[in-house]
Image (cartoon, rainbow, N blue to C red):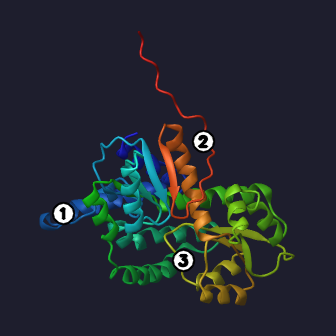
Amino acid sequence: MKLKEIHELAVKMGMEKDPRGKEEIERILAANRDKYEKLPEKEKKFFDLESMENPFPDSRILVGDPETEVRCALVGIDMEVPEVLLADRLREKGEPVDLIISHHPEGRGLVNLDKVMALQADEWYRHGVPINVGEALIGKRMQEIYRAFLPRNHERALDAARLLGIPFMSMHTVADNQVHSYLGELFEKRKPRTVGDVVDILLEIPEYQASAASQAGPVVIVGKKENRAGKVMVDMTGGTEGPQEVLEKLAAAGVGTIVAMHYSEKHREEAEKQKINVIIAGHIVSDSLGMNLILDKLEERGVRIIPVSGLVRVSRAAAPRRRPRAKR
């Protein structure tokens, strides 16, 4: 596959599983195109042109020629300078590493992480929180995250990749949308009665079995396994943690249990106050499940995956497609 084909496939899959729905995504892309057209000419060169076709600013090709043919990719959750050096070392040892894929974004993908957080309001709306309330709450939190990430050394890993001539891309919200949808549909189908039932369902999934075996499996941090689960909400996409104030609104809307990747202590305390059960499924392992659902599609198209940096690789891929033999 070409690098651009990998990226296009990831974005397509991300849009298909996005909580905002196709109509809202089209509206967002149209708004970005309109914004670009209205900019003064001197400002257009600074505009994020891809935002007119790709609604995920944290999922991008960050280094390399989009026409690059990719046979093998080194893939991990956090791909920074050590992992870039590892890719180069593997090349020296004969591994044809054509691409580095990081789940967590670097460069401009990290700078713009706050922009994907808006989709959280749409997810809360699906669970009963008025959209005007959700947008007001997430807007403030987005500004907090923007200020938090602004001072970081965003280009560090990418500079190393450029010097070593290794293409580098990120798949963040596109992958988070996969695990968010996968678990949401699973719980909707299975309708777990208790919090313990939710944990048991998670432990049927190979990725969570692997994390449990390494003592980092799903854990109940608010409530008890014997508690009734009530309405289960999966909280696994939208950049990073939303505002803790939304928990009161979710409780009022009838959410009984939240399944999340991670929770701050302040969020845990607020959930306890609102009597919402909280299960931490695991951060890196949940990221792995989301990535795996995309990586399977690459594998089916003949791209070899080398997992690293915490990626729990479980393949559900069908047999790789074979190129037709040339006629003699």
Q: Name the residue carrying label 1.
A: 44
Q: Quadrant of residue 196?
A: bottom right
Q: Name the residue carrying label 2.
A: 317
CB atoms of marks 3 and 1 within 8 Å: no
Q: Is residue 137 left or right of residue 283?
A: left
Question: Which mark is first along the chain, 2 or 3?
Answer: 3
- The amino acid on which the numbered mark 2 sits, given as a three-letter code, is Ala
Spatial CA distance of label 3 from label 2 is: 31 Å
CB atoms of marks 3 and 2 within 8 Å: no
Foreground of the two, 111 or 102: 102
The reply to whether residue 55 is visible in this rendering is no
Seen in the picture, residue 204 relative to 271 is either above or below; the reply is above
Foreground of the two, 173 or 299: 299
- Determine the secondary structure under disc 1: helix
Q: Which mark is residue 208?
A: none
Spatial CA distance of label 3 from label 1 is: 32 Å
- The amino acid on which the numbered mark 3 sits, given as a three-letter code, is Glu
Q: Quadrant of residue 143?
A: bottom left
Q: Name the residue carrying label 3.
A: 241
Question: Which mark is first along the chain, 1 or 3?
Answer: 1
Question: Which mark is first along the chain, 1 or 2?
Answer: 1
Residue occupying image coordinates x 32% and y 61%: 32
Q: Is residue 251 left or right of residue 55?
A: right
